């Protein structure tokens, strides 16, 4: 009985803390923030000019890429391979260790 009460109280505490610690998300605004917090003007023409400059810079440097190192050890694929090797090694060790030992079924290993 005490275990159920303790588990219930723990779950209630975790959910209560989780809900109270969350903060609202605010949408992005168009404009520059002034020194007193006011929003400045940011027109569509300014946004198009900035995007045109970004495209021109990307076309001028084709070797720079997107900036995401996919095959690097700190990139997406590298991190997936490293994590797979670590967790796969641990799972393999448990699998091999579980086939022998005190509680292994007789005649299976």
Image (spheres, rainbow, N blue to C red):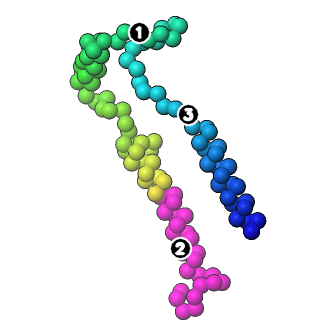
Name the quarter where the N terminus is drawn.
bottom right
- In the rendered view, would you say 78 is above or below 101? above
Instruction: In this rendered view, identify the residue nearer to me: 89 or 17.
Output: 17
Side of 81 where 108 appears, left or right: right
Secondary structure of the residue carrying numbered label 3: loop
* Residue at x 45% of width, y 48% of height: 79
Side of 29 where 54 appears, left or right: left
For the image shown, how many numbered marks are present on the structure? 3
- In the rendered view, would you say 89 is above or below 74? below
Q: Which residue was labeled with disc 1?
A: 40
Return the residue found at the far right.
Answer: 2
Secondary structure of the residue carrying numbered label 2: helix
Residue range in magenta is 85-109
Residue 86 part of the magenta-drawn span: yes
Whether residue 94 can be seen here: yes
Return the residue found at the far top.
Answer: 35
* Mark-to-mark CA distance, 3 and 2: 43 Å
Side of 40 where 48 appears, left or right: left
Q: Which residue was labeled with disc 3?
A: 23
Which numbered dot is residue 63?
A: none
* Mark-to-mark CA distance, 1 and 2: 62 Å
Which numbered dot is residue 95?
A: 2
């Amino acid at each position: 009985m005490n275990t159920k009460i303790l588990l219930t109280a723990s779950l209630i505490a975790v959910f209560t803390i989780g809900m109270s610690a969350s903060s609202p998300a605010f949408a992005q605004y168009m404009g520059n923030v002034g020194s007193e917090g006011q929003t400045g003007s940011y027109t569509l023409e300014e946004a198009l000019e900035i995007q045109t400059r970004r495209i021109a810079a990307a076309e001028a440097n084709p070797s720079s890429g997107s900036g995401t190192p996919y095959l690097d050890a700190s990139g997406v694929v590298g991190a997936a391979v490293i994590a797979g090797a670590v967790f796969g090694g641990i799972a393999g060790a448990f699998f091999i260790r579980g086939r022998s030992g005190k509680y292994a079924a007789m005649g299976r290993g």
